[in-house]
Image (spheres, rainbow, N blue to C red):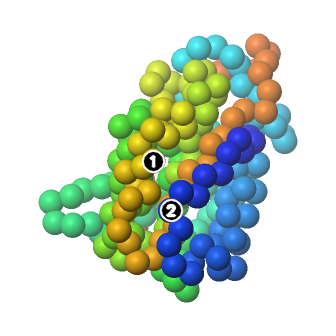
Amino acid sequence: MKIIEENIFVNVGSFGDSKQFHEILNQIRVAISCVTWSSTNEFIIRPERRGNGVVPIKENFIRHLVDNNWRSEVRMSMAEGMNPGKIDLVRATDFGKFAVEWETGNISSSHRAMNKIAVGIIQGALIGGILVLPVRNLSQYLTDRIGNYEEFTPYLPLYKNLIIRSGVIGIIAIEHDKESMDSQLIPKGKDGNAKKDDL
């Protein structure tokens, strides 16, 4: 898998300039490069419209970060009355916890993921977070209505105008390396009810 764009659109306070944040970014970049299909070192997708599943795509990404001291499937404590669900990955830093969400749902799911990150920062549960999204050129071959970068970007002004003391929020847009009709379709399925830790 390759990165098309890194968009850090909220950067308040000293965390964004810290060594730990740059380490986090590098770990995420490497983890994305570990996402492969039909190859040991590339992501080759069968270009069949809406033909490929999404859940198996992020398995190597999660595995790489867990091997580098991230926690997966973490449930975050939020304001009363809110049940935001789990966060894909969380890493502790000296500044606070940092979250990563890998999008496997529709655009509403993308907004929920970003809202979890934003509210987490506002409430002090997180110091930052990144949402990993496919670009439209990839999402067209995935499950119907999967959220994509181009569809989400018009809403960025909402998050850019958050009033926070410290925090970093960004999106990383990803795309397949190659297309081939010889590549197998990625299986479709649903997330399981994995055991979740508390944040």
Could you tell me the amino acid type at mark 2?
Val
Q: Residue at x 65, y 51 (%)?
A: 6
Residue 25's spot in the image, x, y percent?
Answer: 67, 64
Residue 152's spot in the image, x, y percent?
Answer: 47, 38
Asked whether, in this view, residue 181 is left or right of residue 131, the answer is: right
Could you tell me the amino acid type at mark 1?
Leu
Q: Which residue is mark 1?
A: 156
In the image, residue 73 above or below residue 105: below
Residue 1's spot in the image, x, y percent?
Answer: 74, 40
Mark 2, secondary structure of its residue: strand
Observer able to see residue 157: yes
Mark 1, secondary structure of its residue: helix
Observer able to see residue 52: no
Quadrant of the image occupied by residue 117 = bottom left
Any mark on residue 19, and which?
Answer: none
In the image, residue 13 above or below residue 54: below
Q: Which residue is mark 2?
A: 10
